[in-house]
Image: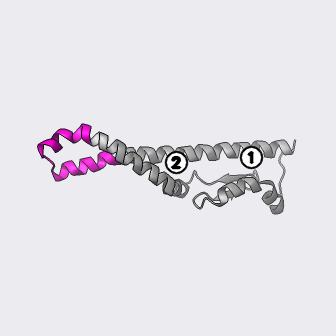
Amino acid sequence: MSCALTSEQERNTFRPFTRHFATAREVRLVVTPSSSVVAPAVDTVPGVLSVAMRPRVVRRALRYLVIVGTILISINHGDAILRGDVTTPRVLRMLLTCLVPYCVSTASSVEAVRALARDRLREQRARHAGAYQ
């Protein structure tokens, strides 16, 4: 059973959901015309990139870059560093080694935000469907 809501009803019905994301600049809300349910737009490329650039996500990824990157560099390049055999290509490989934990942490954080948004959307749809049965 589908039920179309007016704009005023939509604003009143989904206000708690809207308030939660209103402060998050990077997650905008989209009203899908077919279902009249508010959905966070984190499945688009700009949405994913904006989540990846959140200060909190960047800080967490930088922490992992420093901690895990240092460990990986010491494991992979420690002997060359101790020998003094640090060339430009090796420094580039060290930088790439540090990017791995940064990328893994960022991807994990983005996926966690997307999963949370999907769960909240599922809850909103369930409440929306339950209200009109």
| In the rendered image, the vertical position of residue 73 relative to residue 7, given as above or below | above
Give yes or no for contact between labels 2 and 1 (Cβ–Cβ under 8 Å). Answer: no
Do we see residue 78 in this rendering? yes
Which residue does the numbered mark 1 point to in the structure image? 124
**Element class at badge 1:** helix
Asked which colour scheme the image uses, the reply is one colour
Residue at coordinates 63% horizontally, 59% vertically from top-left? Answer: 28
> Where does the image place residue 12, in percent across and percent down from the top left?
81, 58
Q: Amino acid at mark 2?
A: Val
Q: Determine whether, in the image, residue 24 is placed left or right of residue 18.
A: left
**Element class at badge 2:** helix
Residue 114 or 82: which is nearer the viewer? Answer: 82
Judge the density around disc 2: few (<14), some (14-19), many (≥20) Cα neighbours within 10 Å: many
Task: State the extent of the magenta-drawn residues as a range.
Answer: 74-100
- Indicate whether residue 105 is drawn in magenta: no
Residue 68 or 127: which is nearer the viewer? Answer: 68
Which quadrant does the C terminus fall into? Answer: top right
Residue extending farthest to the right is: 133
Which residue does the numbered mark 2 point to in the structure image? 110
Residue extending farthest to the top is: 75
Q: Amino acid at mark 1?
A: Gln
| In the rendered image, the vertical position of residue 82 relative to residue 41, given as above or below | above
> Where does the image place residue 97, in percent across and percent down from the top left?
30, 45
Residue at coordinates 61% horizontally, 58% vertically from top-left? Answer: 24
* Label whose residue precedes the other's in the sequence (2 or 1): 2
Disc marking residue 32: none
Which quadrant does the N terminus fall into? Answer: top right
Q: Main secondary structure of the magenta part?
A: helix
> Where does the image place residue 94, in percent across and percent down from the top left?
26, 47
